[in-house]
């Protein structure tokens, strides 16, 4: 019984993952082929997931991730903030710049946690909940750095706010999470030799806390 239940759960989670990676939606036949599971099993899985709002189908019968997933995601956000804030606090105080944890939400970057330094006269006010395209700003560009052999951080200037400079590093190795840790400042150029290692270490610390 335990093995059967585990297999069913595994298949249900695979359905959600495949649909999440298919923004155009999938038919039952297409989903069955992707999962390499017969259509009868897929119908049962979809029926159960639909009842919980985790899968929806449009007028054409194509399947998509349902809005119920948003409720699950919302429950995870406080955990992410709780684990990240102590790391961001240390980073902000050490560098004297506003530090933040940013997560990918579709094709946007969402500021999930922000900590401002306590000892500086001026610093950037960065609002929790702020959004911008992943293709703009250091935080979004860092999230896209998925190759461990590629660049370890992203740095930008003036892409989101005139005069603002940012440096961010990806949070890697946490299943299902696309995120970055970064800093933003208006105080001249960023000394990458000093700042980058601290930001990278902070991103690694956040990742370790979430594993």
Image (cartoon, helix red, strand yellow):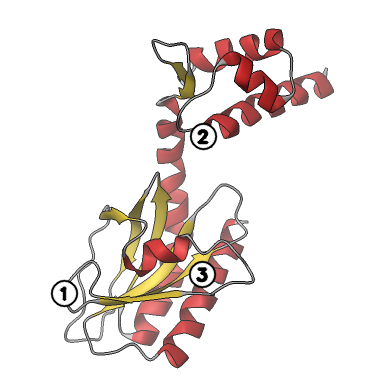
The earlier-in-sequence mark between 3 and 1 is 1
Which quadrant does the N terminus fall into? top right
Q: Position of residue 92 (x, y in %)?
A: 35, 78
Q: Nearer the viewer, mark 2 or mark 3?
A: 2
Residue assigned mark 1: 162
Question: On the picture, is 12 further left or further right than 77?
Answer: right
Q: Earlier in the sequence, mark 2 or mark 3?
A: 2
Q: Say which of 7 and 163 sits in front.
A: 163
Task: Give the spatial CA distance, label 2 vs label 3.
Answer: 25 Å
**Could you tell me residue 67's position as x and y percent?**
40, 26
Q: Residues within 10 Å of mark 1 (few under 14, many from 20)?
A: few
Q: Earlier in the sequence, mark 2 or mark 1?
A: 2
Identify which residue, 69 or 167, lies in the foreground. 167
Q: Which of the 4 image quadrants contains residue 14?
A: top right
Marks 3/1: CA–CA distance: 26 Å
Residue that numbered label 3 is attached to: 203
Q: Is residue 54 visible?
A: no
Q: Residue at x 17, y 86 (%)?
A: 121
What SS does tag 3 mark?
A: helix
Residue 172 image label: none
Give me the disc on residue 20.
2
Q: Is residue 68 visible?
A: yes
Quick check: 40 above or below 121? above
């Amino acid at each position: 019984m335990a093995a059967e239940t585990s297999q069913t759960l595994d298949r249900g989670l695979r359905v959600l993952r495949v649909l999440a990676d298919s923004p155009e939606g999938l038919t039952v036949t297409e989903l069955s082929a992707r999962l390499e599971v017969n259509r009868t099993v897929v119908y049962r899985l979809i029926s159960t997931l639909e009842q919980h709002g985790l899968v929806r189908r449009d007028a054409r019968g194509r399947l998509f991730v349902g809005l119920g997933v948003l409720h699950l995601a919302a429950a995870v956000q406080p955990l992410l903030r709780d684990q990240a804030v102590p790391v961001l606090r240390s980073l902000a105080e050490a560098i004297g710049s506003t530090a933040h944890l940013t997560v990918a939400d579709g094709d946007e970057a969402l500021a999930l946690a922000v900590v401002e330094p306590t000892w500086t006269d001026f610093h950037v006010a960065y609002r929790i909940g702020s959004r911008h395209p992943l293709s703009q700003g250091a935080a979004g560009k860092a999230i896209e750095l998925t190759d461990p052999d590629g660049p370890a951080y992203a740095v930008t200037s003036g892409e989101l706010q005139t005069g603002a400079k940012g440096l961010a590093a990806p949070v890697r190795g946490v299943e299902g999470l696309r995120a970055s840790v970064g800093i933003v400042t208006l105080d001249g150029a960023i000394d990458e030799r000093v700042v980058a290692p601290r930001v990278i270490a902070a991103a690694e610390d956040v990742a370790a806390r979430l594993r």
